[in-house]
Image: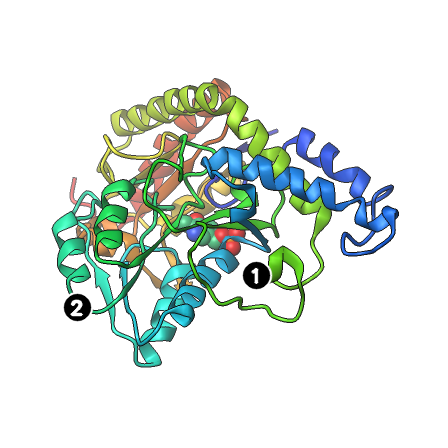
């Protein structure tokens, strides 16, 4: 029987057994409503407060009540951008980049359609952002809301968020960063860098899907997008998803304890995988700045082959990875991130993202390295474009 190897951890991660265990009492014993007056319900609130402290600790927030629990990273991104724009006087200028996740590009396009000015900044061929562009955009003469991600989900490239935040705040603007992919992978601290709003998502760091958080620095104004309740201090109405919030807290605590050890582990495996593929697969190249990326991610293009075909063949042998391409209106669109990086046409459709977690082993990497040359050679034999 084939092995099963999961190397798609930027899509979602396995829930850590310790996280599942931490959640279970909140389905059985402690199922009360934290807003209730009685002790049975109201007593649950202290577990939410504890989770808030655990999340705050992972991202270096000074005050736990700067954390608002949400249903996912997409909600946090939407809430940050639309909430900040709505709370600002006048018509702020929105600054973002071409390589953001859809959860940021979606609300940015929405606001553009509503008449807001949106500047969508380019990246270079390595996926890096030019700070001069940020500086120029922030000099528009208008108040700014900038939403610029910390680490890219497709390539792992990390943006210089401290410098970006300084530029935006110097101009009196508000700076949101989507930290969904970096939280738990590299130590971060909002106490040390000028970030006003920051999004995280549970299922990218071994908590379940369906829970996230938004950090809102004290004094930053955002209009709530779900109204009609006092929960989260009136900033996000709705009875709290207690088990999942507890799970997110536990996952953050575990990430904090393990971050150094896990970073070293995944970086070593990722580098072995990447070097092995480059050495054994013809026409392979890494997309994104290799010196400036998340330790768990590699995005590799294979010349003249289709990423989807590679994925299907990998799936057949039990390997779960992903491609940068998305299926849009029945046609296969190349990744907007790779297009923004001007990846050559011959490479654009053949990209695969491998993203690792602490649960991957050397045996997993051995297996992927054993399979990849067969898959690529087979597809290159079938490709009408290959000349060698
Ligand atoms: N932002 C980034 C960078 C992501 O990678 C993702 C998910 O892939 C999201 C936001 C959305 O998070 P969620 O799936 O929790 O809505």
| Quadrant of the rendered image containing residue 271 | top left
Vertical placement of 182 versus 323: above or below? above
Instruction: Compute the Cα span from label 2 to label 1.
Output: 30 Å
Return the disc, 2 or 1, that comes first in the chain's sequence: 2
Residue that carries the numbered disc 2 in the rendered image: 141
Residue that carries the numbered disc 1 in the rendered image: 235
Image coordinates for residue 360, horizontal then vertical, percent: 51, 26
Dot 1, crowdedness within 10 Å: few (<14), some or many (≥20)? Answer: many
- Do we see residue 329 in this rendering? no
Query: Mark 2 and 1 residues: CB-CB less than 8 Å, in contact?
Result: no
Q: Is mark 1 within 8 Å of ligand 1?
A: no
Dot 2, crowdedness within 10 Å: few (<14), some or many (≥20)? Answer: few
Vertical placement of 91 versus 234: above or below? below
Vertical placement of 299 versus 33: above or below? above
Residue at 37%, 27% in the rendered image: 270
- Do we see residue 307 in this rendering? yes
Residue at 68%, 30% in the rendered image: 17
Q: Quadrant of the C terminus?
A: top left
Image coordinates for residue 62, horizontal then vertical, percent: 47, 38
Q: Quadrant of the N terminus?
A: top right
| Quadrant of the rendered image containing residue 238 | bottom right
């Amino acid at each position: 029987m084939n092995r099963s190897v999961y190397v798609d951890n930027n899509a979602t991660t396995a829930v850590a057994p310790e996280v599942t265990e931490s959640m279970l009492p909140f389905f059985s014993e402690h199922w009360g409503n934290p807003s209730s007056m009685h002790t049975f319900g109201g007593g649950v609130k202290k577990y939410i407060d504890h989770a808030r402290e655990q999340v705050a600790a992972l991202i270096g927030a000074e005050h736990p009540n700067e954390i608002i629990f949400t249903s996912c990273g997409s909600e946090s991104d939407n809430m940050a951008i639309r909430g900040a724009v709505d709370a600002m006087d006048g018509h702020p200028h929105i600054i973002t980049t071409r390589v953001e996740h859809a959860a940021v590009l979606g609300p940015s396009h929405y606001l553009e359609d509503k008449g807001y000015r949106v500047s969508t900044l380019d990246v270079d061929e390595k996926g890096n952002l030019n700070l001069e562009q940020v500086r120029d955009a922030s000099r528009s003469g208008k108040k700014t809301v900038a939403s610029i991600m910390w680490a890219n989900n497709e390539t792992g490239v990390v943006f210089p968020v401290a410098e970006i935040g300084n530029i935006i705040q110097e101009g009196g603007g508000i700076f949101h960063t989507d930290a969904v992919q970096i939280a738990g992978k590299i130590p971060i601290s909002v106490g040390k860098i000028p970030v006003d709003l920051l999004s995280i998502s549970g299922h990218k760091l071994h908590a379940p899907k369906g829970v996230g958080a938004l950090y809102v620095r004290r004094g930053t104004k955002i209009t709530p997008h779900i109204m009609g309740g006092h929960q989260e201090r009136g900033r996000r109405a709705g009875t709290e998803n207690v088990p999942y919030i507890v799970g997110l807290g536990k996952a953050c605590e575990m990430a904090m304890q393990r971050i150094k050890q896990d970073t070293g582990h995944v970086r070593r495996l990722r580098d072995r995988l990447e070097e092995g593929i480059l050495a054994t697969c013809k026409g392979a190249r890494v997309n994104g700045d290799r010196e400036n990326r998340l330790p768990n991610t590699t995005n590799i293009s294979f010349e003249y082959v289709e990423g989807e075909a590679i994925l299907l063949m990998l799936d057949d042998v039990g390997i779960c990875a992903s491609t940068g391409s998305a299926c849009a209106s029945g046609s296969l669109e190349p990744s907007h991130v790779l297009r923004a990086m001007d990846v050559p046409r011959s490479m654009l459709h053949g990209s695969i993202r491998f993203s690792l977690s602490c649960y991957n082993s050397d045996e997993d990497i051995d297996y992927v390295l054993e399979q990849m040359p067969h898959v690529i050679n087979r597809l290159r034999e079938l490709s009408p474009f290959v000349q060698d």
